[in-house]
Image (cartoon, grey):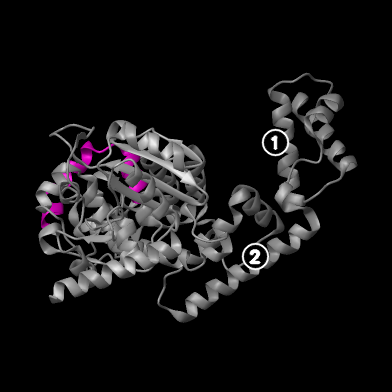
Amino acid sequence: MSAKKVILGAASELALRTLVERAPLASSLAEAFKKEGFRLALVGGPVRDAILGRLGNDLDFTTDAPPHQTKKILKTWADHTWDTGILFGTVAGKRGDTTVEVTTYRTEKYEEGSRKPDVEFGETIEGDLSRRDFTVNSMALELTGETPEFIDPFNGLSDLGKKVLRTPASAEQSFSDDPLRMMRAARFASQLGFTIAPEVIEAMQSMSGRISIISAERVRDEFIKLLMSNDPRIGITILVDSGLADLMLPEIPKLRLEIDEHHHHKDVYEHSITVLEQAISQEERLGGPNLVIRLAALLHDIGKPKTRNLIAGGGVSFHHHEVVGARLSKARMKALRFDNETIEAVETLIALHLRFHGYGDGEWTDSAVRRYVRDAGDLLDHLHVLTRADCTTRNTKKADHLARTYDSLETRISKLAEEEELSQIRPDLDGAAVMSLLGIKPSADVGKALDFLMELRMEHGPLGEERATEELLQWWKARRHP
């Protein structure tokens, strides 16, 4: 037996053992296809993950069955099925905790300038594997033969062992077929800790402009996967160095501001990546990996390039960069089709990320604490994480001082929260009471009166109904008879 066969046999055995242990339903699905005279193979990422011993509950299969036959078979096997991708050859189903996608052998490519791929169904699994993104995803485990067969026509197992990303065909052909694969290379590098082969990097750099034909939704989803990986620094750096970020997230490469010997400032790009990493290290406080805090951390300083001002005699200022950054983040995230809730949350955090530093060395009045909590709202814990992560100074004494000052602020917030229910700050009188006391109907004056009462509440804490009534009547009298 050759060395290659020994290696492939071991890989097949490991993948099969992992598949049996973690996805026992795969064999019954294979039997269902075999019974109807069709072939079925586990393919792509699940094979890679099975070899790595980390198979999940989402499994991808490929088959020689036409899509309508796949749908028919899945209906007899799965608890639920859906065929939204049937035009592209994909039918999905779920049985228990296992979700499967079964796709007819196919090739897929984008014509020049087209945003929609052309899909052609193939006749062999080898042809199907030849048009996949990377060799480590071009392996299959055929399950309908007498014994499982490991199929690896492009030496994906060898690349998996070397932790390198290569393409089955030429990188130029692969990225022409689907330009999103360039982003996927960056994502896999972050998720798996792999390097990208030099020829693949070169193709990414020369073809980065092709990403513009991919829909914003697909770009967004791929970027989210990268950002939510264990080490997003790797992937973000690849996006920037390859030129892809210039097209899909141009605010990030713009953070690489020129630094000259006369006007020193912190490396804003490196600072932003470090803030992201420090925010990730605190995510347990938010219940685990959190998209909003990662986006806010990465984007929090994107207003700096537009607000950069060189100070006479040396130094650089970035006045109001948090305001500009909040606006830029909103525009960029809208362009990438993020949902409104995520956009608003990130925008709020960026707008507030300097608030802590605006109150000096901890001389926070109760009023300032109340406003901080009110403005953060449900994002208060996110703001705590972002503000702490934003300290990247190498000066240990300064870092310790900032941490202690923020500890003090959080203590103040907790103390006031116990006394005043800070999470539910509202005026001491409601709209109905205002209209009754002032003898007015619903109008702009009611809103102004409530704003006045809210300002009193923020400044002085709970007033009580009696004092609030007195203050309101005095305010109303002064407005009517200045």
Crowd rating for badge 1 (residues with CA inside 10 Å; few <14, some 14–19, many 20+) = some
Q: Nearer the viewer, residue 245 or 429?
A: 245
Image quarter in which the C terminus is found: top right
Q: Which region is colored magenta?
A: 202-223
Q: Who's the residue at 10% across and 60% down the image?
A: 199
In the rendered view, tell whether residue 466 sits above or below residue 316: above
Estimate the x, y position of residue 386 in percent, counting from the top left: 50, 60
Q: Which residue is drawn at 18% across and 55% down?
A: 242
Q: Where is residue 479 shown, x and y percent of the image?
A: 75, 28
Give residue 440's quadrant in the image.
top right
Residue shown at the point (78%, 60%) measured from the top left: 418
CA gap, disc 2 and disc 1: 27 Å
Residue 204 within the segment the image draws in magenta: yes
The one nearer the camera, 218 or 309, is 218
Task: Report helix, strand or loop for mark 2.
Answer: helix
In the picture provided, is 69 more to the left or to the right than 338?
left
| Coordinates of residue 327 in the picture (x, y in percent) | 42, 42
Closer to the camera, 177 or 295?
177
- The image shows residue 189, relative to residue 133, as above or below, that is below
Looking at the picture, tell me which residue is in the foreground, 64 or 158: 64
Residue bearing mark 1? 451
Compare marks 2 and 1 and give the one earlier in the sequence: 2
Residue reaching furthest to the bottom = 397
Residue topped by disc 2: 410
- Please indicate, yes or no, whether residue 411 appears anywhere in the rendered image: yes
Residue type at mark 2? Answer: Glu
Residue visible at 14% across and 34% down? 111
Tag 1: residue type? Asp
Depicted 434 relative to depicted 133: above or below: above
